[in-house]
Image: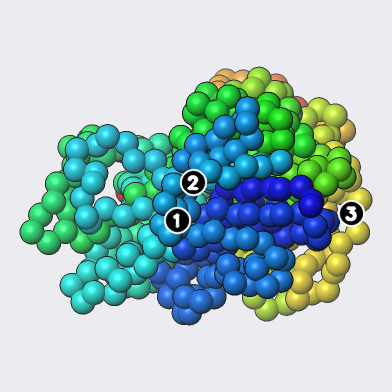
Amino acid sequence: MGKKILIVGGVAGGASAAARLRRLDENAEIVMFERDSYISFANCGLPYYIGETIKERSKLMVQTPENMKARFNIDVRIKSEVIEVDTQDKKVKVNSADKGTYEESYDYLILSPGAKPIKPPIPGIDSKYIFTVRNIPDTDRIKSYVDQEGTRSALVIGGGFIGIEMAESLRERGLDVSLVEAAPHILAPFDSEMVTFAEKEMADHGVKLVLGDGVEAFREKEQGIEVSLKSGLQLSADLVILAIGVTPDTGFIKNSGIELGARGHIIVNEQMQTNCDGVYAVGDAVETTDMDGQRTAIPLAGPANKQGRIAADNICGLNTMYKGTQGTSIIKVFSLTGASTGFNERTLQKMNIPYRTIYIHPNSHAGYYPGAQAIAMKLLFNDEGTILGAQAFGSEGVDKRIDVIATVLRLKGTVYDLAELELAYAPPFSSAKDPVNMAGYLAENVLSGQLDIFTVKDLEMLQPEEQVLLDVRNTMEYEQGHIDGAVHISVDELRERINELDKDKEVYTYCAVGIRGYIAARILKQNGFKVKNLTGGYRTYSMSKYSPK
């Protein structure tokens, strides 16, 4: 008889572990417990089914118990909740809809319980009009309510990925949608001057954003619900989607001796092992490390699938390691795409890691080929050129740029590597200098001293008696909007008018996106001026000032 392995929870981590275990060991006895009726479903697709982008409910089912049995010979037990783990005697207690309560022994145990939506003790939070989005039954309840004739408005609480995707999906269904976020901005992985691209897109598509405000109370009306915010604002809607984050679903192992982190996550090592013999854990419920070796928890499907595979490998003696998470993520916001990888500025500041920042706004493909759209990109790196993180927003080509940078980051590459990468080019797809190369070139220029830059935040520190702000765009651009206090000399006139500038003052140049400002900075520097250029130009500046109100 082979080893006996129990898996608690399916979806990404548990299901991938089960399939990998069987591929590695035909003789193992593998039992999977799932509290609900669905063992492996596309939980990232749930909002899009509610929004009817995904039309058929069956498309959400990745694996059924029957298929898992037929293909992988896995004993799948649905409607079976593991309520206790005994790590001393190596057994679990199961509460089953069919068999009642019973015990099951194990040689190895893989915990993949996932995370559940946070429901804080706010008055009225148990209203029938308030929904969370975690699984297929949740999705069915929301969709049937949205499908009702009288449902016209929705309020989403929380501006994370699920909140944004739900707001978009409900808006696509024709509902009036408001979104409330307690933080100053939505989408925490993005820094504030980048996430405004997403906020503008949502506002442009009719989603009312209420930022920097939290919920005080919910109150049911005859039809629908009224929401009181901490600012005193009152909102009402036919339904509320609660999407303020998730917490690990680990209550059932509280007394098992398995070590938990401060927020209830299961602590694991590089092999996905817990502190208890034969017990592994994967997915949204675990605490692993980030690229800097700091403890972190990232509830994403990609890491969950990898971790499931790694746990299976180690049970079967392959000694595979999980080398930390870098939090690479992507989101669709109506016609916009946002993606990020690695650290953002807030995290780097919190960790006291020194960094440099550049912004670029290149086209998604050659400008002369129809349909080119600007991509807003931000790159974070250190004085050695090591990449620390990147963020981007745009209509097309965002995914491949962040994926390329994420790959270089994973391989501990530098901005010099970005400059050297040979990427696929033809006019419909890219430019001869790909946006990734351009980010590398600019970072290289900054590190080599070819270009001194300043950021939007540095504008607050400018002293008119010591520095002059120089707008080098054309007259029409300048008249349509400029930074207060800026002198205007077009880059094409700069050589002729250079004597109008005071050499005793440092010149701070800017243009639309940074390129003309860089050219102006090079002209000025070689004429004996001290000069810095605004990285990202007026476009980054104007987006940093955007407010959806």
| Residue 14: image location, x then y, percent | 63, 52
- The amino acid at mark 2 is Tyr
Q: Quadrant of residue 293?
A: top right
**Disc number lying in front (3 or 1):** 1
How far apart are the alpha carbons under marks 2 and 3? 58 Å
Q: Residue under label 1, please give it.
A: 99
In this rendering, position of residue 427 left or right of residue 247? right
Q: Give the farthest residue toward the front.
A: 1
Q: Is residue 416 left or right of residue 381?
A: right
- Mark 1 surroundings: few (<14), some (14-19) or many (≥20) residues within 10 A: few
Residue type at numbered disc 1? Lys
Badge 3 marks a residue whose secondary structure is loop
- Going from the N terminus, do you reach mark 2 or mark 3 first? 2
- Does the residue at mark 1 contact the one at mark 2 (Cβ under 8 Å)? yes
The one nearer the camera, 180 or 96, is: 96
Number of the front mark, 2 or 3: 2
Report which residue position mark 2 lands on: 102
- The structure's colour scheme is rainbow
Q: Earlier in the sequence, mark 3 or mark 1?
A: 1
Tell me the element at label 1: loop
Residue shown at 76% from the left, 47% from the top: 3
- In the picture, measured across the screen, residue 46 lies left or right of residue 301, that is left
Mark yes or no: residue 285 visible: no
Residue 522 image point, x, y percent: 81, 40
Q: At x 47% / y 75%, what residue is drawn? A: 57
- Separation (CA) of disc 3 from disc 1: 59 Å
Label 2: element kind: strand
Give the image location of residue 56, x and y in percent: 48, 79
Q: Which residue is mark 3?
A: 421
Residue 182 x, y percent position in the rendering = 36, 38
Amino acid type, callout 3: Leu
